[in-house]
Image: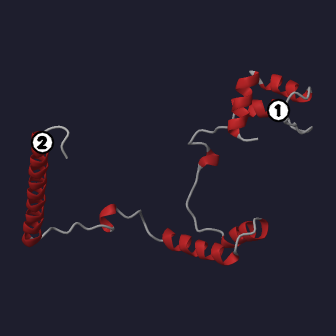
Amino acid sequence: MGPHTALKLIREYGTLEKFVEAVEAGKTKFQIPEDWPYLDARELFFNPDVRPADHADCDFKWESPDVDGLVQFLVTEKGFSEDRVRSGAARLQKNLKSSQQARLEGFFKPVPKTQEEIKNLKRKNEEKNEQKKKKAKEEKKEKQKAKAKPRGTA
């Protein structure tokens, strides 16, 4: 059961205990495993194990990855491709050598437009505006012609 269904059922039954009672009475299609400690789950939800950032267990440091440990876990236990895991670890090790994240300007350098490009842009915009004006004028003429025709004639 996912979180959306669980929330829907809690809203429907009101409490976790009422839902468990309904399951035990056979009123729902769901089954609860016999060894599911739902009271402990509730306690963990309301009182999670949270530590402050200055706690000794929260002292994280970037170090070089344990490639053999990654291969052991991802390839042996989870079935990933060893080549992909090793190439990913190699990229990770390569990127750890760089000191900081690159700035956006490093990827895209602004190039100023030349005077010729600026003139071409102005000319294109002027041509577009000119075409719009001509089109609007033609549409206005067509509307006037349509109004001038007497009704019932084609």
Image quadrant assignment for residue 6: top right
Image quadrant assignment for residue 3: top right
Residue 45 visible in image: no
In the picture, measured across the screen, residue 134 lies left or right of residue 5, that is left
Indicate the position of residue 66 as horizontal and vertical percent values.
66, 69
Indicate the position of residue 102 as horizontal and vertical percent values.
38, 64
Indicate the position of residue 28 as horizontal and vertical percent values.
85, 31
Q: Amino acid at mark 2?
A: Lys
Tell me the element at label 1: helix
Mark linked to residue 145? none
Q: Nearer the viewer, residue 13 or 96?
A: 13
In the picture, measured across the screen, residue 140 lies left or right of residue 4, that is left
Q: Nearer the viewer, residue 72 or 98?
A: 72
Q: Which residue is mark 1?
A: 38
Q: Residue furthest front?
A: 153
Tell me the element at label 2: loop
